[in-house]
Amino acid sequence: MASLIRASELPDTRQAKRRDWSVGIPAFTAIRQLGIAGMSGAIIIACLVVMAVTVPLVSPYGVAETRSAERLREPEFAHPFGTDRLGRDQFTRAAAAGRTSLTATVLALALSLTIGVGLGLLAGYAGGAIDMVVMRVADVIMALPTLVLGIVVAALFGPALLTVVIATVSFWWAGYARVTRTLVRQVRNEPFVEASRAIGATPWRIATREVLPHIWGPIIVMAALDVGSLLMTLSGLSFLGLGAQPPTPEWGLMLADGRAYFLDAPFLMFFPGLMIFLCVLGVNLLGTALRQRVTKSV
């Protein structure tokens, strides 16, 4: 009959389902929307995280296990990254160092975001004297050389990984405070904010429930692009001896340990440097893709 639709004209829903299997998974859907560069960055970061979590657990070598008979061995099947001056497996230590470095970076970023966004939200919404004080303090901090300021703070409290995290947070929050304040001032007089005021909402509720959700996009993009800089700052301070201390594995500290053997065993510096490079590359690719997506949606 003419009213019947031939089977050949029906869409192949099974093929569509096989082709779009990731559509039902929010994480995969979000990553696919970031394009090839964003997906590449996410894959690099995921690989580094998996390596940092699993390798120290399954490796036959302990993170601090020394073997004097195997010191300074070049990369081979048993030791893909070689061994250091104490005979420790560099692949295991590089993976464990990733856990240390990434944890410190995420902690520093979270604290900087909390302080910076909180103060920026307060300054932008309250205005007046509060705005002036917060912004002048932020201006002074941003005018100082960040690495020098971090060295001074770390030197005052003594060398430790937590010390360099605190030192980094002490100046990193200022950038988030300034950006947040600018974004808040752009939306604080919008109709939806005025409507909340009209129904008697408290300033705290307006700032956190109405204003903050509308400005998260640029802040998240800025934070994603800052991860690489934060990682290099923390690794740099550890390289100078102000951060993680032996025998704790950390990428910057591993670079410092391999410096004395650069001519005889360059792989001691190459592989920790490669880990830092890959991590920075991954977060920059992901951050750039996020920025492009946020820009298109504005």
Image (cartoon, rainbow, N blue to C red):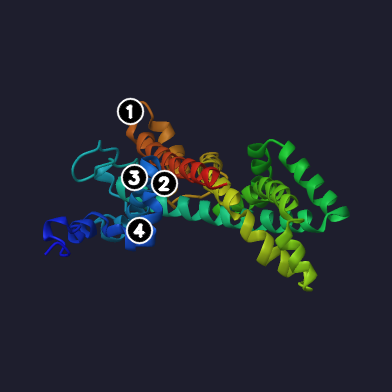
Q: Nearer the viewer, mark 4 or mark 1?
A: 4
Judging by the rendered image, the residue that carries numbered circle 1 is 264
Closer to the chain start, of discs 3 and 1, is: 3
| Crowd tier of the residue under label 3, counting other residues whose Cα lies within 10 Å: few below 14, some 14–19, many 20 or above | some
In the rendered view, tell whether residue 285 sits above or below residue 55: above
**Residue 255: percent from the left, percent from the top?**
44, 38
Q: Is residue 8 above or below residue 145?
A: below
Give the label on residue 34, or none: 2
- Report the residue marked by disc 3: 86
Q: State the image coordinates of residue 222 (x, y, percent, origin top left).
A: 58, 46
Distance CA(mark 4)–CA(mark 1): 31 Å
Q: Regarding mark 3 in the picture, which secondary structure is present there? A: loop
- Report, in whole angstroms, how far the alpha carbon at label 3 lies from the one at label 4: 24 Å
Label 2 and label 3: CA atoms lie apart by 44 Å
Q: Name the quadrant of the N terminus.
A: bottom left
Which three-letter amino acid code belongs to the residue tagged 1? Asp
Say which residue appears at 77% left-offset and 63% top-offset. Answer: 194
The amino acid type of the residue labelled 2 equals: Leu
Q: Which residue is mark 4?
A: 53
Disc 3/disc 1 C-alpha distance (Å): 15 Å
- Is 22 situated above or below 38? below
Q: Is residue 271 left or right of residue 132?
A: left
Q: Amino acid at mark 3?
A: Leu
Looking at the rendering, which quadrant does residue 130 occupy? bottom right
